[in-house]
Image (spheres, rainbow, N blue to C red):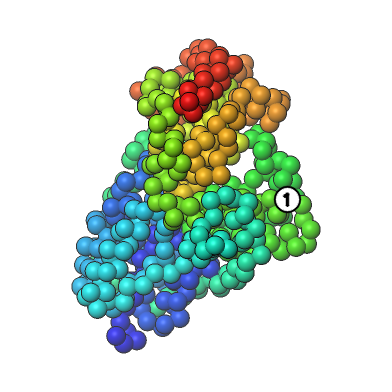
């Protein structure tokens, strides 16, 4: 290889210029850099909302790269095949990428690395998705952490490398290889009419993510601890959709919030703990790759959860008759995200009051959330269901009415998203009917349903199932 041999920089969930180890290393070589994004076997399996949001991010980052005299080559097909074709077309001697940690991505990347190295290609992976590589955090006995609090104590004082400077220039190749047209991929096709509704709430791209972080740190982090459980408020950072696509790096968030914590700003430590909760999810996924598909506690394999059922379909449609649960699901259809407190309540209702397998809910969130994350989503569902690591005890059953009274006392959140609760519903409540599939036949004048199950009776049924299971 010479100084004119190109490097293919395979971009995935690292669509930013600031604190980008792989892109910074490529720029530092002085060699031509060809950024590439592949609509490959992993992208093709994404749910409707995550795939749409990824397409928006790719388009935005392509424009950013063009703004610094570079570009983004798009190809569709299996990753190894497309990379090999690009190597032939460009004479590239290296393929670099940022690591991912879900099982499907790891299997793909392991195969790509082995095949390319066998061809004499410099196939190399870089960190950048997490604060700490999952295999580097170990207990005193050399194992991995299975409970969050000890994990937090282990990493809260652990050094985190300072964010790298923003990449401002990439040497272009002598000639650019052909590129697909992003619109031809139709990544938002499965969203249908819902895409236009969700687009009003998405903050796409690195600049938007940085603005979100700055606004949160300047104005809202001091109230984060007290306000983060109130879904009608505006206390959270809303950075989850940006983090999952790498539009902002976790090190940048960590160091900015850490400085405020050290300065005694209230809410900063709580916020950092939530960032580390994401790390903990990936730590667990690394050591238990089946986290999204199998009970973490194998003794739960015999629990009598129901498979998919008509009650679960009512839950999916935001028509359970429990306003707090329905508001949560409807928030997801309108905004693409769901407040964390609402996620817990909605998940508890499905798995306990409706005795439905947590994987039914996990799959639905995977299809509908623009901030879907394979580790956090899986761990969250198992935590609520009671079968996961560091889980809430099964008998901790969230009562939607009690949760609403505590965390939405004036009903603002429920009225914001459930049109049937207001004489004059707002735009977001009405947008629900524009976002959901037309085949559901839901309209603003559709009568609001009676509750699927009496809350006390549903709790008693769940506890009886648990006692019978424990035997």
Where residue 292 sits: x, y (%)?
A: 41, 44
Q: Quadrant of residue 141?
A: bottom right
Q: Position of residue 307 (x, y in %)?
A: 37, 27
Whether residue 290 is visible: yes
SS for callout 1: loop
Residue at the farthest front position: 471
Whether residue 183 appears in this view of the structure is: no
Seen in the picture, residue 116 relative to 470 is either above or below; the reply is below
Q: Residue at x 31, y 64 (%)?
A: 110
Direction from residue 54 to residue 460 in the image, left or right: right
The percent coordinates of residue 189 (x first, y second) are 33, 40
Q: Viewed as shown, does residue 84 lie left or right of 279? A: left
Q: Is residue 261 above or below residue 194?
A: below
Residue in front for this viewpoint, 330 or 289? 289
Q: Is residue 358 above or below residue 309?
A: below
Front residue of 84/16: it is 84
Residue 195 horizontal side relative to residue 118, left or right: right
Count every numbered label the image shows and give the total: 1
Give the residue displayed 75% in from the left and 62% down from the top. Answer: 262
- Residue 136 coordinates in the image, percent (x, y): 51, 66
**Foreground residue, 125 or 426?**
125
311 to 235, vertically: above or below: above
- Crowdedness near tag 1: few (<14), some (14–19) or many (≥20) residues, C-alpha within 10 Å: many
Residue at image x 42%, y 82%? 29
Q: Residue furthest bottom?
A: 2
Which residue is identified by label 1? 267
Quadrant occupied by the N terminus: bottom left
Q: Is residue 366 found left or right of 221 in the rendered image?
A: left
């Amino acid at each position: 290889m010479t100084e004119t041999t190109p490097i293919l920089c395979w971009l995935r969930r690292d669509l930013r210029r600031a604190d980008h180890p792989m892109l910074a290393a490529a720029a530092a070589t002085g060699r031509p850099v060809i950024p590439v994004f592949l609509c490959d076997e992993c992208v093709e399996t994404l749910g409707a909302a995550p795939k749409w949001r990824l397409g928006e991010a790719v388009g935005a980052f392509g424009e950013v790269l063009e703004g610094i005299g570079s570009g983004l080559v798009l190809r569709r097909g299996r990753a190894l095949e497309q990379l090999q074709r690009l190597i032939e077309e460009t004479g590239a001697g290296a393929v670099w990428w940022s690591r991912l940690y879900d099982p499907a991505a790891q299997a793909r990347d392991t195969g790509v690395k082995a095949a390319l190295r066998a061809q004499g290609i410099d196939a190399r992976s870089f960190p950048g998705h997490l604060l700490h590589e999952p295999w580097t955090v170990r207990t005193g006995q050399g194992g991995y952490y299975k409970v969050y609090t000890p994990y937090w104590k282990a990493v809260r004082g652990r050094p985190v490398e300072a964010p790298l400077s923003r990449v401002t220039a990439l040497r272009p190749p002598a000639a650019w290889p052909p590129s697909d047209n992003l619109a031809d991929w139709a990544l938002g096709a499965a969203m249908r009419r819902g895409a236009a509704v969700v687009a009003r709430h998405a903050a796409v791209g690195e600049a938007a993510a940085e603005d979100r972080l700055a606004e949160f740190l300047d104005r809202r982090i001091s109230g984060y601890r007290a306000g983060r459980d109130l879904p009608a408020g505006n206390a959270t950072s809303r950075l989850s959709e940006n983090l999952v696509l790498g539009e902002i790096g976790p090190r940048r968030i960590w160091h900015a919030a850490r400085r405020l914590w050290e300065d005694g700003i209230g809410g900063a430590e709580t916020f950092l703990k939530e960032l580390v909760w994401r790390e903990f999810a990936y730590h667990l996924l690394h050591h238990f790759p089946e986290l999204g598909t199998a009970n973490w506690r194998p003794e739960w394999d015999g629990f009598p959860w129901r498979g998919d059922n008509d009650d679960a379909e009512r839950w999916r449609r935001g028509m359970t008759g429990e306003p707090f649960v329905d508001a949560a699901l409807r928030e997801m259809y309108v905004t693409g995200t769901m407040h964390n407190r609402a996620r817990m309540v909605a998940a508890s209702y499905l798995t306990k009051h409706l005795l439905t397998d947590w994987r039914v809910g996990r799959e639905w969130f995977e299809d509908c959330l623009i901030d879907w994350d394979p580790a956090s989503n899986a761990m969250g569902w198992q935590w609520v269901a009671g079968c996961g690591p560091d889980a809430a005890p099964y008998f901790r059953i969230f009562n939607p009415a009690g949760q609403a009274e505590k965390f939405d006392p004036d009903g603002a959140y429920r009225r914001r998203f459930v049109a049937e609760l207001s004489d004059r519903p707002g735009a977001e409540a009405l947008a629900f009917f524009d976002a959901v599939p037309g085949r559901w036949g839901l309209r603003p004048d559709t009568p609001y349903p009676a509750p699927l199950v009496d809350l006390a009776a549903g709790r008693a049924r769940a506890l009886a199932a648990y006692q019978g299971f424990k035997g």
